[in-house]
Amino acid sequence: MWNKVRERYYIAYVEIKQPLEAVVAPDGYTGVAVVLRFLGRPVGFFMQGGAGIAADELATAIFRHAGKQILSEKVYADLRGSLDTSPFPPLDIAICTHGRPDALARCLRSLDAIGLPCDGIRVLVIDNAPRDQQTASAVKEFPRVHYLVEPKPGLDFARNRAISEATGELLAFLDDDVVVDPCWLEGLREAWAANPDAGAFTGPILPLELETTSQVVFERMGGFGKSFERVRFANVLPESPTYPVGAGVFGAGANMVFRRLALDQLGGFDDALDTGAPLPGGGDLDIFYRIVRAGYPLVREPKLLVYHQHRREYGRLRHQMWTWGLGTMAYINKSWRHDAAHRPEIRRWVWWWLCYQLSKLFAPFLRRNRAHWPWDMVVAEVAGAIVGLCGEYDRSIARVERVRREAA
Amino acid sequence: MKWRVISIELSEPLAELPACAGYEGVRVVFFQNGVPLGHCRLAAAQLPASPQHLANQASNAIALAVGDYLLEEGFRSALPGVPEPQPESPGRALRSLVRLKNPVQELAHRLSAQVESTVTVSIAVCTRERPEALARCLASLAKLSEPAVEVLVIDNAPQSGRTREVVELFPGVRYVCEPQKGLSTARNTALALASGEVVAFVDDDAVVHPKWLGRIRRCFSDSNVMVATGLVLPAELETQAQMIFEESFHFFHQGYRHRRFDAKYFSTTRNKGVAVWEIGAGANMAVRRTVYELGHRFDTRLGPGVFGGCGEDSEFWYGILAAGWSCVYEPSACVFHYHRRELNDLRRLVYQYMQGHVAALLLQFAKYRDFGNLRRLLLRLPAEYAVLVLRLIVTGFALDQRILLRGALGCLAGLRFAFRKPQQA
C-alpha cells in the first residue's frame, strides 16, 4: 500500500558449484530471488534487492542461507548410507481446478516433462463446478490424464472426489497454479523409502514468478514457508507447547501427498473448509492436524518441491490474507470443537498467534529492516481471523449443507 | 516428566532406537569418537526410531559442529554479544564446503589424530558434605583414559568425617581439608597446593567423560590460554526440576562448537558488559597455575558458601580477560552433571545464581571500573525481566517461567552485596 515503487524480482536458479557465476538481473527488475541447489537438491532460497549479486557476495549469501543445509545433507547421506528407492507404490496425482485452463495446462506440462503420468502413476484432473468446456479441452491435449467433473462447488468436495476415484496407495494433491520441479517425484520416492510408515508428505513451495509488487510482498512475508530442513513430524514435538495446532509448519495444500488409507480412515477432507468464496482456506491445515493427531508421521521433504504462482494484484493479495485469517480460525474453531483433549494447546496457540500478529505490526519500529509485513496485510489477516473466530465454521457448514441439498 | 538420557556413537552403524517404557521420551546426544556434536529429543510417540530417522535427526543436530571441526571458516560459533563471524574469504570457504566428502568419516579420521600435549594436569574436586556424589565422581576419575598427575579432594568446612572416609576408598586421591567455608577459598587452596601446571576443576555432583582430561589438557598448548571450560551435559533427566534446568534455562549449555574469548573480544564488548558467564561453567573448568602465581584469585567474597550460588568463576574469568589472557570453551571436554532433583532446590538455585551474578557484576565494576557491568545490571537485566513477565503472561504462567522470575528476587538480594562490609579473605 505504501509501496510507491513497483517491485519486480528476477528469479535465478543457482547450482552451487565452482566457480560461481555472478547473478545478473535483466533490465527492469528491482531485485533478485535465488533458488539454491546443490547436486540437484534444493537447499535454500533468498531474496535481495538490487540489479544482481557479484560472485563473492553470492558465496557469502549461500553460506548464510544454505551452508548448514548443504552440510547436513552431506552428513545425512553419510549416516544413512544408500537408500533403495526402487520399490514404490502406485500413486495418484490429483489436481483440483476451477476455471484456470492455462495454469492447469502449465501444471500438466511440468508433470509431462518428468514423464508423468506413467505406469503406476495416474494423473487425475478434477474439474470443480465447471462453467464452460475450457478446462475439458485443455486436458484433451494430455490424452493419458484422467478428467473428472465434481459438480458440487468447493475445493474439498473436489478433493474428496479424488479420494473416492483414487486407486493407488499414495495420493498427491497439487494446486492447478503450481509447476512441479524436475526432482519432485524423486523426492517423493526418497521420502517414501526412508519413511514407509508416514501418513503424509509435504514439501517447499517457492514462487514461480515475482513479477508484481504483490508477489514480491507475499514472498517477503514468508510466502508458503520455505524450510529446506527434512523433518519427520510425529504427534508430539517436545519443544513446542502448542504443537501441532500451528499446522502451517507442515506445508500447504498446494503440494501434499497422503497415504490413501489414512485419508479414508479420517473420512477425507472437511467439506465445510476450503469451500471457495467466502471461505477458501483451512482445509489443508485441518487435514495435516488430523493426520498428525491420529498418530501418522508427517514428513517434510525438501526435494518435494513445487513453484506456485502467487496473486498478481495487490488487492487480491490482501483478500487472500483475509481468507488466511478466516480459514485458519475456522479450522481452529473446528478443532476446538472436535478435539477437546487438545484445547489447552489450541488456546495457547490462538494467544500466541495474536501476539505474533502484534509483533508483526511493531516489527518496523523494532528492527532495522523495514516492513517485512505491510500493516494492511496484517490488519486484513487479523480481521479475517476475528470473523473466523465468530462462528464462520458454523456459517460454512450451513452453506455447504445447502450446496449438498441443491446437488441431491 | 522424566526423559531418558542416551548417547549414540556415530562411528558405529546406527541401529533402531527402541521405545523406552516409563519415560516421556529420550534425549539423545550424538558423539563421534567420544566428542559430543549435538543432541535432539524424541518423544515416546516417535519411538521406536528407524536408523533413517535417527540419521536425519543427527544430520540436523550435528551439522554446525561438524562444520566447525572440519572447515577453516564459515561455521564458527558466534560469541555472546558480538555479530556472527562471517568467512573472510567466502569463495574459498564455499569451495571447501562443496568439496567436502564423507564428512562423518573425515571427522572420525581428524579426531583420532589429535595433537598431543605435554602439559601436566592436577584434578581438583571441591566438595562439602556430599559423600555419595563424591564417590561417583571419583569413580569416574579413576576411569580416565590418561591419568592426571594427582587428584585432590578439597573438603570445604566439613561437618563430619564422611568425605574423608570416601576419599580413603580411592587410593592415590589426596584429601585436603579447607576449614574456611566458601567455594572460592577451596578453589584457591587447590591452586596453591596442586603440583601440575594446570588445575582441572570438576564439581562433586558430576562425572567425567573418559577422555575429558586429555581434551581439556590440549587447550593449554596455546600459551595465551589461561582458562579452559567444557561442555556440561545432563547425566540424567529423571525429574521435572532436572528437565526444566536443562531444557528451559540453559545455564550450563554453551553449544557444541569451540569458542575463544580473548583480549580483543574483551575490548569489543567492554562497554556493553562482557558476557563472561557464557564462557562456561565452574563445574567443568581448568586453570593454568601461572595466573595464580601472578596473583589472580577466586574472590572469597563471592561464590557458594559465602554469597550467592555462583559468580566466583565468571568474576575470575573477567580478571583473566582483563589482564589480556584468553579463555576457551572446549565442548569436547565434557562432563555429565546431576542436576537438582527437587523443584524447591531448583527455585533456590535460580535465586542464588542471580544473586551471585549481580554480586559478580558489582564486584567487576568495583575492581575494573567498567561501566558495561552497570549497564548490564541496570538496563539489560531489568529489560530481560520485563520480557520475562510478558512471556509469563503469554505462556499462561508456565512453571519454568515462574521459577525464572524468582531470579528477580535473587537479583535484588544480590544488590545487598554492595553494602556488605569487606570480609577478611
Image (cartoon, rainbow, N blue to C red):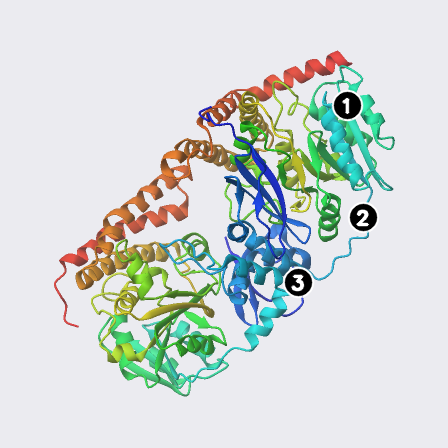
In the rendered image, the quadrant that contains the C terminus of chain B is bottom left
Mark before the other along the chain sequence, 1 or 2: 2
Does residue B23 show up? Answer: no
| Three-letter amino acid code of the residue under disc 2 | Phe
Which SS class for mark 2? loop
Q: Are marks 3 and 1 on the same chain?
A: yes
- B128 lies left or right of A138: left
| Three-letter amino acid code of the residue under disc 1 | Asp
Q: Which of the 4 quarters of the picture holds residue A326? A: top right
Q: Chain of mark 1?
A: A
Which SS class for mark 3? helix
Name the residue tied to disc 2: A88
- A298 lies left or right of B290: right
Which mark identifies residue B277? none
Does residue B357 show up? Answer: yes
**How far is mark 3 from mark 1, CA to CA?**
45 Å
Mark count: 3
Q: Chain of mark 3?
A: A
